[in-house]
Amino acid sequence: MANFQYIALDAKGEQTTGVVQAGNDAEAIQQLRGQGLYPTQVVEEGKGTLAAGAKKKGAKAKRRSRARPAARLSRRSS
């Protein structure tokens, strides 16, 4: 089994990081989901790094609004 570092969001949208042991990344993701977490990154230790600035435990995740301008939502009448 290998160690996998992860970044995940909890049910409140709080970002958390940690390490889980699993046979592969799919198993690591399954374990995290079983704990009620929503993984955003899973990397095997020694085979990559987590995104810069994302290692702060408990930091709030930034969310981008995908609001569309009202002009795009309304239909034009002919």
Image (spheres, helix red, strand yellow):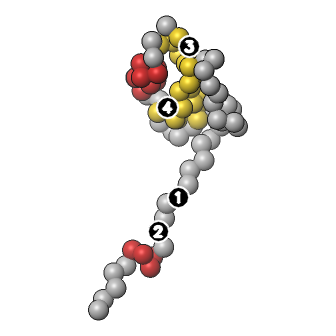
Q: Position of residue 54 (x, y in %)?
A: 66, 36
User: Can you tell which quarter of the image residue 36 is in?
Assistant: top left
- At label 1, the amino acid type is Ser
In what element is the residue under mark 3? Answer: strand
Q: Is residue 35 visible?
A: no
Residue closest to the far front: 47
Residue closest to the far bottom: 78
Q: Position of residue 61 (x, y in %)?
A: 59, 42
Residue behind mark 2: 68
* Residue at (39% x, 74% y) in the render: 73
Mark pair 1, 2: CA separation? 9 Å
Residue closest to the far left: 78
Ranked by sequence position, the earlier of labels 2 and 4 is 4
In what element is the residue under mark 2? Answer: loop
Q: Position of residue 4 (x, y in %)?
A: 55, 18
Instruction: Confirm or deny contact between disc 4 and disc 3 (CB under 8 A).
Output: no
Dot 2 surroundings within 10 Å: few (below 14), some, or many (20 or more)? Answer: few
Circle nearer the viewer, 2 or 3: 3
Dot 3 surroundings within 10 Å: few (below 14), some, or many (20 or more)? Answer: some
Instruction: Confirm or deny contact between disc 1 and disc 4 (CB under 8 A).
Output: no
Badge number at residue 22: none
Mark pair 1, 3: CA separation? 34 Å
Instruction: Confirm or deny contact between disc 1 and disc 2 (CB under 8 A).
Output: no
Ranked by sequence position, the earlier of labels 1 and 3 is 3
* Residue at (49% x, 31% y) in the render: 39
Residue behind mark 3: 3
In what element is the residue under mark 4? Answer: strand
Mark pair 2, 4: CA separation? 27 Å
Mark pair 2, 3: CA separation? 41 Å
Residue behind mark 1: 65
Residue behind mark 4: 39
